[in-house]
Image: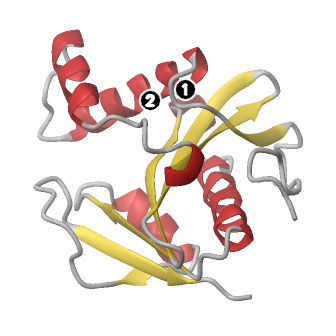
C-alpha cells in the first residue's frame, strides 16, 4: 500500500518540468507563508477589502488549517524547483468523501497548470485512501477557479454548508 505521506507519482505538465507536489505539515514555515498569501489574495478580492496584517491574522485564526494533516486530511505544496508556487488541502469527511480547500497558485505561476496539478495530486491521494467522491465550495467572484473545476470534471451540486463566503458548490465522483 502506498504511504499517503510520500509522492504517488509525477504528473507531467508541459513547460513546467520542474513542478512537483509534496505533502506538507500546514504549520511548517513554507505552508504558513503560502497560506498567508492565499488568505491575503482572497481577502483583497472580496469587495476590494484591505488585507491588513491584523485582519489576515484574524481570518487565519478563524479558519485554521490544522485539520489538513494526519487522519483528518492532507495539505500539499506545489514547488517549481525549490520555490513554493501553489498549495491545496483535502479534509477527510468520512471514508467515502473528501473536501478540497485552500487551492491557490501564486501570481508568478498562474497559467502554468499548478492548480490542476495540486488537484490531481489530491485526487490521487483521495483514491489511494479509498474515497469515491470529492466536493468543494468557492465564491462567485472566483470565476477562474470555477472554470478550472469544471474543466477538471467537477459539476455543480447542492449547497452543503452555511459558509457566508461560499456561493458555488461542486462535486466529483472519482472513477476507479
Say which element carries label 2: helix
Q: Closer to the camera, 28 or 78?
A: 28
The residue that label 1 is drawn on is 31
Identify the disc placed on residue 87. none
Residue drawn at (49%, 19%) of the image: 33
Which corner quadrant of the image does residue 69 belong to? Answer: top right
- Please provide percent x and percent y for residue 145: 42, 59
Q: Is residue 80 left or right of residue 165?
A: right
Circles 2 and 1: CB atoms closer than 8 Å: yes
Residue drawn at (63%, 59%) of the image: 122
Q: Is residue 82 left or right of residue 56?
A: right
Q: Where's the C terminus, which quadrant?
A: bottom right
Crowding around mark 2 (Cα neighbors within 10 Å: few <14, some 14 to 19, many 20+) is many
Residue drawn at (24%, 55%) of the image: 141
Image coloring type: secondary structure
- Please provide percent x and percent y for residue 19: 80, 40
Q: Closer to the camera, 9 or 110?
A: 9
Which corner quadrant of the image does residue 160 belong to? Answer: bottom left
The residue that label 2 is drawn on is 35
Toward the front, the furthest residue is 71
Task: Judge whether 70 appears above or below 24 on screen.
Answer: below
Amino acid at each position: 500500500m502506498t504511504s499517503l505521506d510520500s509522492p504517488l507519482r509525477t504528473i507531467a505538465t508541459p513547460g513546467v518540468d520542474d513542478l512537483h507536489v509534496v505533502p506538507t505539515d500546514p504549520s511548517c514555515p513554507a505552508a504558513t507563508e503560502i497560506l498567508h498569501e492565499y488568505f491575503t489574495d482572497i481577502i483583497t478580492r472580496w469587495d476590494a477589502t484591505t488585507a491588513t496584517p491584523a485582519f489576515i491574522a484574524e481570518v487565519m485564526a478563524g479558519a485554521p488549517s490544522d485539520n489538513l494533516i494526519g487522519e483528518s486530511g492532507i495539505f500539499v505544496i506545489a514547488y517549481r524547483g525549490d520555490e513554493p508556487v501553489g498549495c491545496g488541502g483535502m479534509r477527510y469527511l468520512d471514508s467515502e468523501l473528501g473536501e478540497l480547500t485552500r487551492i491557490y497558485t501564486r501570481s508568478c505561476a498562474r497559467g502554468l497548470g499548478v492548480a490542476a496539478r495540486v488537484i490531481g495530486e489530491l485526487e490521487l491521494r483521495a483514491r489511494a485512501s479509498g474515497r469515491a467522491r470529492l466536493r468543494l465550495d468557492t465564491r462567485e467572484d472566483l470565476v477562474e477557479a470555477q472554470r478550472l473545476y469544471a474543466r477538471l470534471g467537477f459539476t455543480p451540486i447542492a449547497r452543503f454548508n452555511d459558509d457566508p463566503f461560499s456561493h458555488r458548490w461542486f462535486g466529483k465522483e472519482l472513477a476507479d
